[in-house]
Image (cartoon, coloured by chain):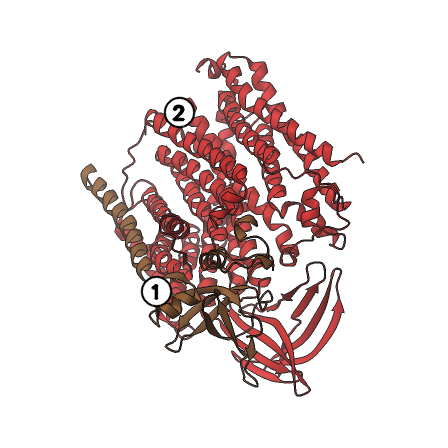
Chain colours: A brown, B red
Amino acid sequence: MTRKIRRLWFVVIFIACFGTAIGLILRAFSSDIVFFVTPSQIVFSPLSYHRVVKLGGMVVAGSVHWKKHTETPTVTFDVTDGLKAITVIYRGILPDLFREGQSVVVIGTTTPQHTFIASEVLAKHDETYMPKEVADALRKSGKWDPRFGPPPSDIR
Amino acid sequence: MFFSPELGHYALALACIIATAQGIFPFIGLYYRNSLLINLTYRLAYGQCIALSVSFLCLIYAAVTNDFSVENIAMNSAVSKPLLYKITGVWGNHEGSILLWAFILSLCGTVVSLFGRHSLPTSLKARVIAILGLIAAGFELFCLTTSNPFMRIFPAPWDGQGMNPLLQDPGLAFHPPILYAGYVGFAVPFAFAIAALLEGHVDAAWGQWVRPWAITAWCFLTCGIAAGSWWSYYVLGWGGYWFWDPVENASLIPWLTGTALIHSAIVVEKRNTLKIWTILLSIGTFSFSLSGTFLVRSGILNSVHAFANDPARGIFILGLLGIVIGGSLLLFAYRAPLLTETNSTLFEPLSREGMLLLNNILLCSLCAVVLTGTLYPPFMAILTGQTISVGKPFFDATTIPLAIPLFIAMGIGPMLPWKRAHLWPLLNKLWFVIALTAIAALIASHKFYGLLPLVCATIAIWIIIASLSDIAQRVALLRAPFLTSINRACALPRSVIGVAIAHIGVGITVLGISAMSQAQHLIVEMPIGTTKHLAGYDWTLTGIAKKPGPNYMALVATLEVRNNGKLIATLHPARRHFNTQNQTIAHVSIASLPFADLYSVLGKQRTIDHTTTYVLKLHYNPLASWIWGGALIMVIGSAFSFSDRRNNHFRHILHRQHLSPSVIEAL
């Protein structure tokens, strides 16, 4: 095998690997990225019902209801950013750090009835922590509640 | 009161000064050819390590004696915390973890000074220790000025705020030191790379010194990542093992480049080529380790606001990273052209080195993909203000297609000879492997749903069978008398066996990951005495009891799992209520069978019409424990190849070099 052909091999393999990597990234960027939305965004500009999104906000106090006597526990609760509220339906165990009146992030899809079918409820951190997205959304909507302490940019 | 926080603070400052001296003296010594200054360097490295151990002991002492006048202890500890977590909690927070980081780095410097005493050329060794000293000085200064763990507060609180209960777990207690040993261990190949750039000379012997260090660091990093993933599997109770979270990715990225490094160092060692690339990989791996630990753990990557909270800390970290990474890359750009490649880098595509190069290209593209997925969300947040997240679907879609050719090459690579291989003998060796893999795939197709998991499982089996058959062919198993084969096996170089073991470990891990995609789970509400059916097992809730723990109150369920009436396992999932933090944590209970994990989580209890029901999450996770078992086998294989006696051969050559007076003059 001549030097030229060897070099060609090398270049072809190199371009093939990195080209594939870039192609895969671009393809995945167009379909597999999860956007963060607030309840008012869902109400004012409805999303495609297939698109998986992250919804963040505060759990409305007193809105958590359990469906009774079903095989899998089903829970509904309202999530609000202070402007609008969305009802979230979730089948499963709520995380231990899930509390009424505290922040929550859920992953799932919207339905035509303005409800949200959650596949995952995230509350991975301790109770003083507020997800950055939720804090930003609350500050944007001007509904930051000083009862929860100073705005999160001051909390570490 | 000997081990007071003030002593610790003082020892830390002392270590910082010693490290600075350790970083400057060798260069002066080499410039003026003063052997006294160079010899002093080694003692400074020991001194720095001793000072830091004193400092670390002081912090542990303060934690154990509940000295809440120390801010760090007051924030992260409590009187009621068990002793083990008081000790391990020292490195569970930002300040303590940086002290641990610096301590491990000083330990690396000490080990280089001790083990390289006779084997390394003086100038190279002095430079390596100097660079380690400079890095250590930077981080000790960071620790002293912006994240001092010994800061006092007044008035001291009666009790501390306690530690996050999720972190109070024996698995997590030792996870950070192991992971950090991995991250920091890559500082040594980095220091070797910088020293080589300064000397303008790299040869096969350089590859031989770097590789053991890279392998050691890699083993620790592998253990650390596996331990972290195992912790998230059995503590977080979500049933999965990898979240593709920025913190996890930050450890995966240096692992990928580190894996590329230990493979490309073989080419430097055996063929005396690919040197510039290996130097770049050494620099890259350590840079990723550094940015991983500091950008992610300090929360800058997760949240842009972390900057606003503590600008001094953020700017210090960025400055330090800029100096270390930018400086080393500049030096690389300036000096790398001096390192001429003796052999041409362009080798035959079908040869051992060709496959190693393919491995490097694929690992680096994988690394690029993971890096893009990790950095894209924060960059988008800064540039457009839009919050997005990149999770499992993205990484599945991008990493699996790149990993598959890598795994295929992994089976072929070790079978090929160096320099030049031919297709026909290779196929002759491979047909048997291909046939066996096809049979295994047919059997597996009954167990796997979906094409992609089946393909991944087949490839995992391919790696295992190919590695086994490589050893079988080397010892002429079944072709020669059995005793001959055994004799041959004993005579095989340990590196060959180590490679086979490590690759089999990868195969086992991949098989575990493929099988985990077939996991089943069920979330149910059960009164006591009821039975649910999942994955061929009957899960019966037989009782609930209250049990007090050291600093919590637990509600423990008893769950009996039966298969056709035969008791397989008794699980005790629990919910623990921690009073200090007013938090309830689910404690997962797992029964590991050879081919599956039975996994259970206890949720909340609810009373409706006088019947109390309990929410339970039941998982059937096939081959889950294989994921971590495979990682352990990888580490054992790497450690085995590390002990290859050929690694000791070079000592003689080096010994000669060490004795020659020309080394210092050659500068």
Q: Look at mark 1 in the image and give the residue it sits on.
A: B435
Asked if A155 appears above or below A45 in the picture, the reply is above
- Coordinates of residue B176 in the picture (x, y in percent): 59, 48
In the image, is B600 to the left or to the right of A82?
right
Hey, what amino acid is under mark 1?
A: Ala
* Residues at marks 1 and 2 touching, judged by CB atoms closer than 8 Å: no
Visible residue check, residue B494? no
Numbered circles on residues, count: 2
In the image, is B304 to the left or to the right of B79?
left
- Coordinates of residue B488 in the picture (x, y in percent): 47, 48
In the image, is B388 to the left or to the right of A60?
left
Q: For mark 2, give the secondary structure.
A: loop
Q: Residue at x 29, y 50 (%)?
A: A17
- Coordinates of residue B174 in the picture (x, y in percent): 63, 50
Q: Look at mark 2 in the image and give the residue it sits on.
A: B201
Which of the two marks, 1 or 2, is nearer to us in this view?
Answer: 2
Gap in angstroms between the C-alphas marked 1 and 2: 47 Å
Q: Quadrant of residue B611?
A: bottom right
Asked if B308 appears above or below B438 in the picture, the reply is above
User: How crowded is the residue under tag 1: few (<14 C-alpha within 10 Å), some, or many (20+)?
Assistant: few
In the image, A40 versus B131, the foreground residue is: A40
Q: Give the chain letter at badge 2.
A: B
Q: Give the chain letter at badge 1.
A: B
Q: For mark 1, give the secondary structure.
A: helix
Asked if B432 appears above or below B492 in the picture, the reply is below
- Coordinates of residue A81 in the picture (x, y in percent): 47, 64
